[in-house]
Image: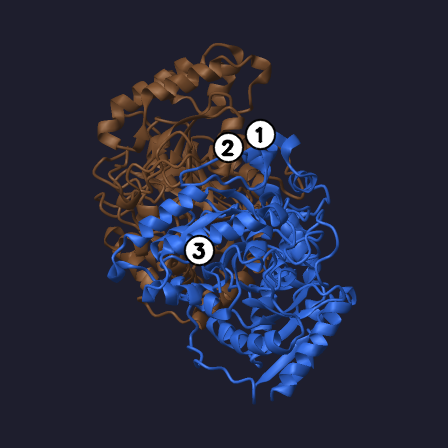
Chain colours: A brown, B blue
Amino acid sequence: MEAYQLTATEALTKLKDGSLTVEEYARSLLARIEERDAAVQAWAYLDPDYVIEQAKQLDSIPPEERGPLHGVAVAVKDIMYTKDMPTQHNSPIYEGDEPKLDAASIITLRHAGALILGKSTTTEFASITTGPKTKNPHDVTRTPGGSSSGSAAAVGDFQAPIGLGTQTGGSTIRPGSFNGIYAFKPTWNSISREGLKVYSLILDTIGFFSRSVDDLQLIADVFELEDDVPPPREFSIKGSKFAVLKTMIWPQAGPGTIAALEAGAKLLRDHGAEVEEIELPPEFDKLPEWHSIVLRTDGRPTFLSEYRIAKDKLAPMLVDHVENESKVSRAAQLEAFDKIASLRPKIDEIASKYAAILTPSVVDEAPAGTETTGSPVFNAIWTALHTPVTSIPGFKGENGLPVGLSLVAPRYHDRHLLEVSRAVGEIFEAEGGWKRQVYH
Amino acid sequence: MEAYQLTATEALTKLKDGSLTVEEYARSLLARIEERDAAVQAWAYLDPDYVIEQAKQLDSIPPEERGPLHGVAVAVKDIMYTKDMPTQHNSPIYEGDEPKLDAASIITLRHAGALILGKSTTTEFASITTGPKTKNPHDVTRTPGGSSSGSAAAVGDFQAPIGLGTQTGGSTIRPGSFNGIYAFKPTWNSISREGLKVYSLILDTIGFFSRSVDDLQLIADVFELEDDVPPPREFSIKGSKFAVLKTMIWPQAGPGTIAALEAGAKLLRDHGAEVEEIELPPEFDKLPEWHSIVLRTDGRPTFLSEYRIAKDKLAPMLVDHVENESKVSRAAQLEAFDKIASLRPKIDEIASKYAAILTPSVVDEAPAGTETTGSPVFNAIWTALHTPVTSIPGFKGENGLPVGLSLVAPRYHDRHLLEVSRAVGEIFEAEGGWKRQVYH
């Protein structure tokens, strides 16, 4: 197996036992990127010489001083500040802009020894659903999803083992599903969002992509995610209890998601879990609408500065936000903000009765075309509720493209959710019907 | 009157009618700063030559292209990124650091024509209560308060007409009171906090200092603060109804604040207002504790990156946050977060019955010494509740130092609150007993 195909955990083993240097690893990934970049176009900025320079620097660190992510390559969404690379937000306003600043998460990752490969593509300010240049590696005529398009496509295409994303609506879980990889949106504010371009303070959440749950555990360790009660090491599906939740969005589900949810529930049952179909209480009915109101009204102060300096270079939807084109009153804004807040402890209570809630990640497999990045409707409710969510790959749609399913746990049960996700992922990946491939 | 003594509104009039150039104005302020800097030490960074260069640049703009704040000088708290000046957060970790990035608020202010004078002092990361070098201009043996120490002292000492601060506990309202000036904490998230160092996402709020309410109105215009119902231009104290609220913190009030609150209520009554003393319902009792829990637990992810790279250079309190030294459980953290959220619509409802709630800004006048910046206890509850707050000067403590009182309105009643503050400020400044002086 070529080094670029390794998960972060596998690469770390080889980097630790001396069978792989960071430079060799970086060269393998760079060769993979060179092979595939014309087709997938996952990168907004990547300087191969600088990657090698950083890799050599990491190799020069004595083994006893190396960090827990020593040499692990990371794709960074281009709304996250990096002091040594441009940060351009896919906005003409910030073309070529290079603030000398690392986001807090980048500081922590670098300190742990991560190798920052480059900046991955995003939709404009991670805020709209018209896409960047990036293609879905599984079918380059289709979208990789968004707004964390590049990070998800890079991880799905073996160009990086770990990708950094963000989610305000469905910008991590949706591209995770479309690219056949694991995606993880931790509990809101459990990891610093300092140095990530703001869309909505109460919604924006950092997210991660990988091809294994072990890799997400590495990330969770580095960022010190901690539950009140550490979960047992090996979660057993057998004897556990899952909820299946179609949500108020279900009428929008396509055949791929309908089949995946049915298959996922059946697989859990087949492996000895009790699976109970639940519904959200009626007080959750307006959650999608409230999420949308918060998004639009938070966008009003958020994009005022760009609106002032270059309204003509700002996406029409963001101009609408600033101008409050939908005429949302402050009273309606506060009602949405407060009602969502009131539902958070309620979803925690519901979710706490189960190992996890199994629920759709997407409307369906990645839609045709690369103009729009698809619908985030199944994700937005969980973003608003602040719960941790993973997307587990393993299923496929009518066109053979990957379809994932989400697992949801109560807030600050991130480590629990990852343990459950590992066990569920093993089953879904083995028996769900979709297999990851390396394309050439 | 020297130009440096002008409020922003007064300076704008002269800048518009041609009787003052930005360069002349800047030179007057720089001379004032030169006169007083050794005593007050409000600045973390100030380059007089660069200020003049910027002023000349502003003067060169044709009158018809000038912005609404053309030439208005602003002191910027040194946790706000400015692309042309260092941003050091009063942290040895960031000594000399100069990211090439403007905070969103700085972009908006520059676009409106503001002249950024320099970076004003702050406590470390605006997060602790041990102070910077800055002294209270009214008594240089005393603290100016914090964490927005420099901006408040600069405005109080006529070194700048407008100061930018932030408030997570009481970092705007408290120094406003200690320096005998107006302070304004708008509704949380009504102005973008992008590019301000994070302490707590749900608490951090940008704030403003001035020596007139008209100046705060200028700021509110530039940032497009907007109530659902625009308030009438001239608020009449006569016939209006105010609440006086001592809060659960009252046992900590010192003689200066006790006298000020009594005098303030009496002045409002004397001018024809109905003044009703109210109490918060018992469900608000734990609000100070919940605020403290949110602060500490939000500090955990916030300072992880600095902890990792330079724990020895981080204030012990912030190390404690990261290490969760007080052992707050996730359950307790979420309870605090959710209970505060549940109180926000309730305080809105209470406050909506009055023109404003009159409540203490501080425990008392600025305490002796400059080691600590004083207590934020009277402010923290309003920061948590997201309501707009102004501090109105006009009273004095037992040592003759200024004491302010806070006015509070429901969320997104910022423009209403400013109109009320103007009317109340006229009375308190004229009859409260404390007079602003220019020290030499």
For marks 3 and 1, give the CA distance.
36 Å
Q: Position of residue B92 (x, y in %)?
A: 59, 34
Residue count near mark 1 (Cα–Cα under 10 Å), binned few <14, some 14–19, many ≥20: some
Q: Position of residue B113 (x, y in %)?
A: 35, 56
Residue count near mark 3 (Cα–Cα under 10 Å), binned few <14, some 14–19, many ≥20: many
Residue B104 lies left or right of residue B196; in this view the side is: left
Does the CB distance between marks 1 and 2 fall below 8 Å? yes
Q: Which residue, given by chain and number where applicable, does mark 2 sit on?
A: A107
Q: Position of residue B74 (x, y in %)?
A: 46, 54
Q: Which residue, given by chain and number where applicable, does mark 1 sit on?
A: B309
For marks 2 and 3, give the CA distance.
34 Å
Q: Earlier in the sequence, mark 3 or mark 1?
A: 3
For marks 1 and 2, give the CA distance.
8 Å
Read off the chain for label 2: A
Residue visible at 48% across and 66% down? B216
Q: Are marks 3 and 1 on the same chain?
A: yes
Residue A76 lies left or right of residue B90; in this view the side is: left
Residue visible at 26% across and 44% down? A92
Eyeballing the image, is A150 above or below B11? above
Look at label 2 and name its amino acid: Ile
Whether residue A342 can be seen here? yes
Numbered disc 1: secondary structure: helix
